[in-house]
Image: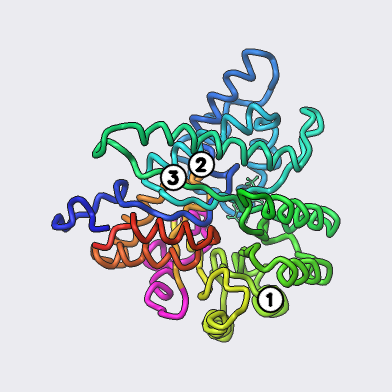
Amino acid sequence: MPAPSARDPVLDYKALPKIELHAHLSGSISRQCLHELWVSKKATGETDLRDPLVEMPPDKHDYDLKTFFPLFSSYIYNLVNDVAAVRYTTLAVLRDFAADGVVYLELRTTPRAMPAAGLTEEGYVQTVLDTIAEFENEQGEDLGKPEGQRRVGLKTKLILSIDRRHTPTQASRIIALARHFHLLPEAGVVGLDLCGDPSVPVNLAALTPLFTEVHSSLPSLALTVHFAEAQVSSSDAELDALLLDWKPDRLGHVICVSERVKGEIVQASRGKKGDERGVVDTVGLELCLSCNVHAGMVCGGFEGHHFGEWWKVQDTVVVLSTDDVGVFESPLSNEYALVAKHFGLNRAEICTLVRRGIDVIFGGDKEKERLREILWTA
Ligand SMILES: CNc1ncnc2c1ncn2[C@@H]1O[C@H](COP(=O)(O)O)[C@@H](O)[C@H]1O
């Protein structure tokens, strides 16, 4: 669809309908939402944590890989610790993405049991899926509005994350959950992810057979992995196993890659054309500029980001993503503004960049069709 203001050379990045494919649920909760949750828990004596606005001061974005991961294990997970909190924060995250003009979201989250609240890992996933359904119903009411006042709705699918810290038993349980929820009629879960602190060694010997098995027995369940996020997680052994044995459909971050590995990525992408799995036919690269720059994961600021190297490569598809908008506070609309500013993309190139993302979503052909209709062509 052409943009309502197609002749205006200045793009309204918020109004631009966008695709977000790399967003961690717990990292996408805004400070304000965490604060509201804290206020209500404090009032009922349910928490003795510090105010999130003190713990994560507004405008502090320079979390590096050492200070970033403990935010979850030592703080956010202790605040978001029951069904009501998961529901409240998930709803807020969905509303924030929708308000920023995101029309298709693949949200990822690590299934987390909350024994004190009587919640199992399965119950956690069910709660997130129920909240997505609730949000979509809430949006549905918008369809009753007269034409011209309707928003294009946000459609959300879920990816289940396995953390590098997980034992093979935990990983097997999450794969089984993904399989279960993927096979339900609504198929709310569309993929698996490998995430977590890159400084934690990943147990490739144990995980590789698990991932290759699910890939071959349930090809429609797609796979994305955090790839070469830091030097310490970029050995040849790790990158070769992830890329060549696991055969992921998308790669997150892709920072510390040698020329040889870059060539392998392009080859893997070309190889997908004839891949009988056919979830996507090109490897997608989920690139998160603000996160990488603020966390000091790349050198040379925004201009030095490897987006500049990849976005014109025809054999792969780059999808701009936010990673953890709650922490780094750069919404997807701003990520597009940043690439326009630092890499000189014009209006047509931005629209093309967004539309190319359609090819690497995990959400199926019907959703691809909807996106082809609603994403701007110019
Ligand atoms: C710097 N970028 C990143 N690299 C690797 N893993 C990341 C991440 N950002 C977030 N996570 C992973 O996502 C979890 C929080 O969301 P969920 O509880 O799953 O919804 C974190 O604990 C971490 O394992």
Q: Which residue is mark 2?
A: 326
Q: Identify the disc placed on residue 235.
A: 1
Q: In this rendered view, identify the residue nearer to me: 320 or 68.
A: 320
Amino acid type, residue under disc 3 in the picture: Leu
Q: Quadrant of residue 76?
A: top right
Q: Which residue is mark 3?
A: 154
Looking at the image, which residue is at 15% across and 55% down? 8
Q: Is residue 210 left or right of residue 147?
A: right
The answer to whether residue 263 is above or below residue 360 is below
Residue 111 rendering spot, x and y as whole percentages: 71, 46
Amino acid type, residue under disc 1 in the picture: Ser
C-alpha distance separating marks 2 and 3: 19 Å
Residue 307 visible in the displayed image: yes
The answer to whether residue 24 is above or below residue 368 is above
C-alpha distance separating marks 2 and 1: 30 Å
Q: Tell me the quadrant of the picture where the C terminus can be found.
A: bottom left
What main secondary structure does the magenta stretch of the protein show?
loop
Q: In this rendered view, identify the residue nearer to me: 364 or 349.
A: 364
Q: Residues within 10 Å of mark 2 (few under 14, many from 20)?
A: many
Q: Is residue 64 left or right of residue 59?
A: right
C-alpha distance separating marks 1 and 3: 38 Å
Amino acid type, residue under disc 2 in the picture: Gly
- Range covered by the magenta-colored residues: 290-316
